[in-house]
Amino acid sequence: MEELNEKSHYKRIQNVLIIVLLLNWAVAAAKFIYGNLSHCVSMSADGLHSFSDGTSNIVGLIGIFLAYQPKDKEHPYGHKKYETFFSLGIAALLLLVSFELVQQGLQRFSKPLVPTIDIGNFIVMAATLLINILVMRYELKCGRELKSDILVSDSMHTKADTLTSLSVIVTLAAIKLGASSVLDPIVTIMIALFIAREAFEIARQSSRVLCDEAAILDDKRISDIVLGVKGVRTCHKIRSRGRPDDIYIDLHVQVAPDMHVNKAHAISYAIEEAIKKNIPEVTDVVVHVEPKEKTPPEP
């Protein structure tokens, strides 16, 4: 049953990425082709950014394929961190795009070219902006529902594309109204810096999982659940790690010093079940049982 759920989960994420990939490529082609035809470097740059969105979708597809492979002898905890690891690949792609756009912007300063702006530029940019907004909302919603690092990271990539498209529209309008054409490369560099910021944000979030940052910061939430199990006297040394949909917890509990080992084992099992019931994202719980010594009477 668990394997079937894993496959269903993988298929849902895969389907979202394929849909987003096709839309990203359509948007990228429209902006890149029309930007080149009109000599508008900021529009072409935005198209290049959209192409990188499509590339990140492919990276995501590879990542989730590896992440949802079944557990094996070499990977007893599964492969889910591959999804988080491949989200770093998306961040790397964003940084490469950012570097390329900075180069294009600087080159246009030394070799200025006045863009040809007409109603077609605005139609293409407005249509692609609308598609980007819908894609971003759809992907982020699915990413949160499915607890997918890849989808959430990729939606941030699309968000960057949405905001950069908006800035390009403003630039086109300003140039059309008589502003200096130097505004075009300036906005291109600003887009590049914004994309770099998004890349660092994705890397920061991914590193939390890969470096085993606490997955549940509120220890009291766990402690309250554990202390609700009959026979547990204290709970301490609570640790958690993992992805939002794959959390591992280990903790120590104290029980009566004369408790039989069978009873202690039953309590450990009850603690695991209680935690998983109250926090469905938890997939593994390790309980260390210790005897609680009786407090000697005060003299």
Image: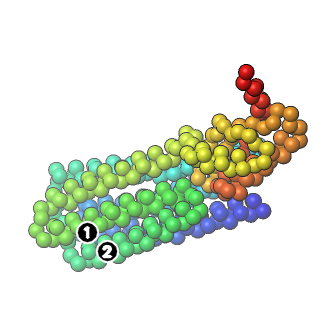
Residue 133 in picture, x, y percent from top left: 40, 70
Residue neighbourhood size for the residue with mark 1, other residues' Cα within 10 Å, grouped as few (<14), some (14–19), many (≥20): some
Q: Nearer the viewer, residue 116 or 213?
A: 213
Q: Residue at x 54, y 55 (%)?
A: 149
Q: Which residue is mark 1?
A: 169
The count of marks equals 2
Name the residue type under label 2.
Ala
Secondary structure of the residue carrying tag 2 is helix
Inter-mark Cα distance, 1 to 2: 8 Å
Residue neighbourhood size for the residue with mark 2, other residues' Cα within 10 Å, grouped as few (<14), some (14–19), many (≥20): some
Q: Nearer the viewer, residue 208 or 122?
A: 208
- Place residue 214 in its image quadrant: top right
Whether residues under marks 1 and 2 lie with C-beta atoms below 8 angstroms apart, the answer is yes
Q: Is residue 71 visible?
A: no
Q: Is residue 207 visible?
A: yes
Residue 92 in picture, x, y percent from top left: 44, 48
Q: Which residue is mark 2?
A: 126
In the image, farthest residue toward the front = 299
Q: Residue at x 55, y 45 (%)?
A: 217
**Image position of 202 (left or right of 73):** left
- Place residue 175 in its image quadrant: bottom left
What mark, if any, has residue 152 been given in the picture?
A: none
- Place residue 213 in its image quadrant: top right
Secondary structure of the residue carrying tag 1 is helix
Residue 168 in picture, x, y percent from top left: 26, 65
